[in-house]
Image (cartoon, grey):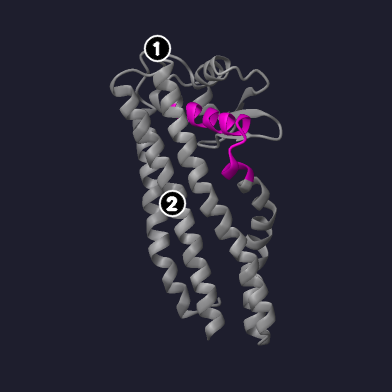
């Protein structure tokens, strides 16, 4: 197994990612046990928001898995994990509203969301090929290959950085929507904020880990 001392810089990012994942899982599990006052399922929350916002061309569908919720802008579909789609919990309402926040970003042409979509192909290539090229360049002593790998991986950083405003904005939109429509009431809004804030930390942790990964690759090039 290949080991380079620069890999040690990844440890803080790994710790933060583990903490963020534990926090979002714990917060989600806690509020998935608390029913909302109105008793609306995640699917009903999403459908109500889309209807009230005048968005009639987006469907809401269940998808397998836990916390696999996402909005697919190409298919115009909000896909909610089964634990959110069928649940009437506060956690389900928060997650469903968040995904509808992405729908509203799409409808309004939110620039960071469009930018993220544009970066996705390069980020996928950089994530899979970048580190491999750096290692290949080190073993062959070919600096040009190392630089190419680092350049490709930079697209991964760009993706994670632009993801932050997209996710935070979607959460802000979600909280405003459930408040304006009265979907959640009183302390329920605080619970929704906690669920979304916990989820936001996973994006922060992932972005930091990607930056540290780039730092590691630069340190490997220096040696």
Image: magenta residue range: 94-114
**How far across and how far down the image is residue 36, in percent?**
37, 18
177 vs 143, left or right, is left
Label 1 to label 2, Cα distance in Å?
32 Å
For the image shown, how many numbered marks are present on the structure?
A: 2
Q: Is residue 3 visible?
A: no
Q: Is residue 215 above or below residue 15?
A: below
Query: Which residue is denoted by mark 1 in the rendering?
Result: 38
> Within the image, what quadrant is residue 8 found in?
bottom left
> Within the image, what quadrant is residue 181 found in?
top left
Look at the image and say whether residue 56 sits in the magenta stretch: no
Query: Which residue is denoted by mark 2 in the rendering?
Result: 204
170 vs 150, left or right, is left
Crowding near pointer 2: few (<14 within 10 Å), some, many (20+)? some
Look at the image and say whether residue 99 sits in the magenta stretch: yes
Residue at the (53%, 79%) spot, across then down: 220
Q: Can residue 173 be seen in this view?
A: yes
Residue at the (59%, 42%) spot, across then down: 111
Furthest residue in direction top, as rendered? 38
**How far across and how far down the image is residue 54, in percent?**
60, 17
């Amino acid at each position: 197994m290949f080991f380079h001392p620069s890999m040690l810089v990844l440890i803080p990012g790994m710790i933060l990612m583990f903490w963020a994942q534990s926090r979002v899982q714990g917060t989600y599990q806690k509020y998935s046990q608390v029913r909302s006052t109105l008793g609306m399922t995640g699917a009903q929350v999403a459908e109500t928001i889309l209807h009230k916002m005048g968005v009639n061309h987006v469907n809401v569908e269940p998808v397998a898995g836990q916390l696999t919720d996402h909005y697919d802008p190409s298919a115009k579909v909000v896909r909610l994990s089964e634990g959110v789609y069928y649940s009437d919990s506060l956690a389900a309402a928060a997650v469903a509203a968040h995904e509808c926040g992405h729908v509203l970003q799409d409808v309004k042409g939110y620039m960071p969301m469009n930018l993220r979509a544009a970066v996705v192909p390069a980020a996928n290539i950089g994530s899979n090929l970048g580190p491999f090229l750096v290692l290949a360049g080190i073993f062959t002593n070919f600096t040009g290959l190392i630089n190419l790998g680092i350049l490709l991986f930079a697209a991964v950083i760009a993706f994670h950085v632009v993801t932050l405003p997209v996710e935070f904005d979607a959460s802000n939109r979600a909280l405003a929507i459930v408040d304006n429509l009265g979907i959640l009431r009183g302390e329920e809004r605080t619970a929704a904020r906690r669920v979304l804030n916990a989820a936001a930390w996973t994006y922060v942790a992932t972005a930091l880990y990607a930056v540290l990964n780039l730092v590691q690759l630069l340190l490997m090039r220096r040696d």
